[in-house]
Image (cartoon, rainbow, N blue to C red):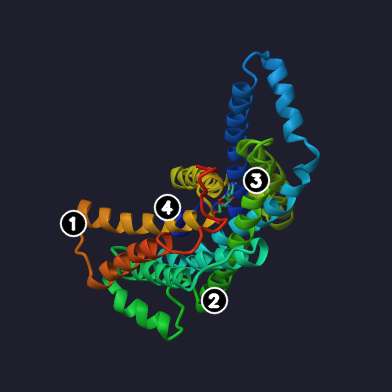
Amino acid sequence: MVMHHSRNSPTGSEPRYLASTAVLVVEALKLLVSLALATRDMRKSHPSSSWLEVLLHLRRSICASDSWKLVVPAALYTLQNSLVYAAISHLDAVTFQVTYQLKILTTVLFSILLLGTTITPRQWLALVLLTAGVAVVQVAGPLGSDSWKDRLTSLIQGDVSLSEGPTSGAVKGLVAVMAASLISGLTCVYFEKLVKDSLASVSLWTRNVQLSFFSLFPALFIGVIAKDGAAVARDGFFAGYNSVVWATIALQAFGGLVVAVCIVYAGNVAKNFAASFSIVVSYAATAIIFRTPLTLPATWGATLVLLAMYLYHTSSAKRTALLPTSEDE
Ligand code: C5P
């Protein structure tokens, strides 16, 4: 919502901020925080070393020979983050969120394809219920309750011109969010495997330093310079920045770091379940705090999400590699 507001609220005579600069600033911020946390971890694992030795250990770990493996997820995440900005500039917040839930299914698909994860029919049912439940909460919850019937009818009829922009913009937005969902599934599975395979020798935060470092290059050279170079030269790098833009950047950076922790310590499927559950919690919290009426469809949607969580996690099949194992815990 904050990001949608930052892209769509009037800016007066100021130019709108460039999404490419925000993507770069988010990566720079995550790099600094990850560097601080990696230093703390290194200090803990070498308690008797001096600060200089700790920093040398850290440099060796960050510049290790397998660091190039982070180039792929760095490029993909930068593309995903740019697509998210493009999508949210053309779609309303609800349509964006509903479509972005496709990542629940793409994550599972890539887990099967790349990791050989097996999903039982009961778990498939849970995943489909989860996707449907989150979509219903989004469409019929407080954000969309004023016109949820119109919105649903429009979605079913394929009329995607739900944003203030022209229909072609809405189609572009939909294509962007679908591509972002596909990339999200692929990249988080790749990142989970890479980090878990080497967690004993390379810490999560060192991996995140590498990820953010390699993300700076596509974000700077492709996004800021090649795509928006002329606008940056004309208006300046921080043109259009205001408190909402900085709030968006802070949320994106913090959210990204939380995603990293979820992927490694809970697993990708659990991360998506948590994100879906958070939508249900926000729905309930909004209803209680702002006294908005609970709509019947949204309550059904929330029930579906809870049922899906129960079905998935009580599946009789052996726990898959994507779920936390007792060793991970
Ligand atoms: O769950 P989803 O795919 O939407 O999350 C992706 C987001 O998390 C991206 O913005 C990505 O940059 C961020 N991320 C991160 N560090 C990781 C993994 C993801 O900052 N290790």
Left or right side of 180 for 95: left
Residue receiving disc 3? 195
Residue receiving disc 2? 171
Quick one: 190 or 235, which is closer to the camera?
190
Sequence-wise first label, 1 or 3 = 3
Between marks 1 and 3, how big is the CA–CA gap?
43 Å
Q: Residues within 10 Å of mark 1 (few under 14, many from 20)?
A: few
Residue 302, disc: none
Q: Amino acid at mark 2?
A: Val
Q: Amino acid at mark 4?
A: Val
Residue receiving disc 4? 2
94 w.r.t. 200: above or below: below
Q: Viewer-nearest of labels 4 and 1? A: 1
**Does dot 4 land on a helix, a strand or a loop?**
helix
207 w.r.t. 263: above or below: above
Give the residue drawn at x 19%, y 64%: 293
